[in-house]
Amino acid sequence: MVDFKKMKKSDLKDIVVRQLHEVEEIMKRSKESNNDFYNVIGSIIYESGYLENRHLKNPNDFMHKKLKKNNYLSMAEKLNAAIDQINELKKEYDSSNLNQIQRIEKGNHIQTEKLKGIEKSTDIKNDNGNRNHSSRGGKRKGAGRKGLGITKKVSLTLTEEVWEKIEQECKRGKKQSQVLRDLIKKGLGG
């Protein structure tokens, strides 16, 4: 992990400019490829300070002359944390059940459309002249993976040592969300 505190103001400025461009690229890619993921990272981007500092992407912006090292330090740390968090979410999102659920829903949609085609060709009128329709396909009450609880998006600031311990746990096969959930439960005595 980079120690921004030891850097010169000019180096921090360059990093902040690069980070602002990186966040902008993440936003563009997310918007183009997956609206759901873009909605998830919106709060992270907002909390990173990107919106109020996006004009600083231009290294020649007059505000750069007024900013002090501490301003760049704060921005670099926030943006770096946001980028790391977004990249972690992207990994989880890409490998999670959300993609599987979307694929299943698409598959169900295709199957439903096929069934509709079959039903149209094999509809039978009953004695009252009404058509019988298949009851297959679509949402079913009680189907799907059960939730663990209420989901709330949170931005969490911890020391580097704590994040390293969390990352070590993640390398043992646990997801970051599970590690954090276990630590919170343990801390609350549950």
Image: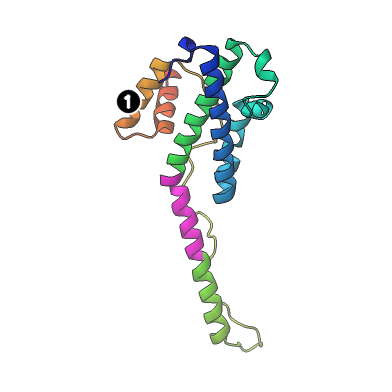
Highlighted range, magenta? 94-108
Residue 79 position within the rendered picture, expressed as x and y whole percent measured from the top left: 55, 25
Query: Is residue 10 visible in this depiction of the protein?
Result: yes
Q: Position of residue 168 (x, y in %)?
A: 32, 25
Quadrant position of the N terminus in the picture:
top left
Q: Quadrant of the C terminus?
A: top left
Q: What residue would you read off at disc 1? A: 168
Picture coordinates of residue 87, whole percent (x, y): 47, 35
> For mark 1, does the 10 Å Cα neighbourhood hold few (<14), some (14 to 19), or many (20 or more) residues?
few
Magenta stretch, main secondary structure class:
helix
In the image, 52 versus 143, the foreground residue is 52
Residue in the foreground of this view, choosing between 33 and 169: 33
Rendered view: 136 above or below 143 = below
Residue 138 is inside the magenta segment: no
Indicate the position of residue 59 as horizontal and vertical percent values.
62, 25
Q: Residue furthest front?
A: 60
- At x 47%, y 53%, the residue is 101
The residue sitting at 61% across, 88% down in the picture is 125
Q: Amino acid at mark 1?
A: Gln
Q: Is residue 39 above or below residue 132?
A: above
Residue at 59% over, 46% down: 31
